[in-house]
Image (spheres, helix red, strand yellow):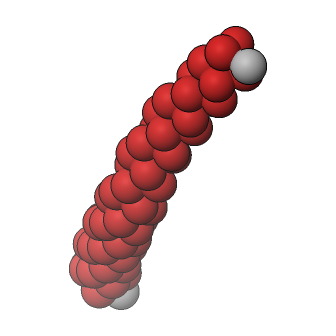
Amino acid sequence: LEKTIESLVDREKNLDALVTKTEGLQQSSMDFRKKAGQVRNNMWWKDAKMKLVLGVLLAIILLIVI
């Protein structure tokens, strides 16, 4: 009976530790998702700016040639 009670107490501690780790992982995943969205948005804008610069340069070269 005493061993059973000890094992139940140990299992409760393990479950509490698991719940704590799970909550930490959930918060980390939310932070990662937010940062990933910011990086994706920044890269999109960087790509858009590069395309705009290349388009303007191409237009200028075409105007000089013609």
From this viewpoint, is residue 66 visible? Answer: yes
Which of these two is toward me, 6 or 55?
Answer: 6
**Looking at the image, residue 40 lies above or below residue 13:** below
Q: Quick check: 2 left or right of 29?
A: right
Residue at x-position 50% and y-position 30%? 13
Q: Quick check: 6 left or right of 43?
A: right
Q: Tell me which corner region of the image, top left, top right, bottom left or bottom right, holds residue 50.
A: bottom left
Q: How many numbered marks are there?
A: 0
Which of these two is toward me, 54 or 22?
Answer: 22
Q: Quick check: 54 left or right of 21?
A: left
From this viewpoint, is residue 58 visible? Answer: no
**Looking at the image, residue 27 lies above or below residue 60:** above
**Looking at the image, residue 22 lies above or below residue 45:** above
Q: Tell me which corner region of the image, top left, top right, bottom left or bottom right, holds residue 64.
A: bottom left
Q: Farthest residue in the top direction?
A: 3
Q: Position of residue 38 (x, y in %)?
A: 31, 66
Residue at x-position 48% and y-position 39%? 16
Q: Position of residue 40 (x, y in %)?
A: 41, 64
Q: Position of residue 31 (x, y in %)?
A: 34, 57
Residue at x-position 35% and y-position 71%? 41
Q: Position of residue 46 (x, y in %)?
A: 30, 65
Instruction: Locate the C terminus and report the quarter of the image it occupies.
Output: bottom left
Residue at x-position 64% and y-position 25%? 5
Q: Farthest residue in the front direction?
A: 1
Instruction: Locate the N terminus and report the quarter of the image it occupies.
Output: top right
Which of these two is toward me, 16 or 35?
Answer: 16
Which of these two is toward me, 44 or 17?
Answer: 17
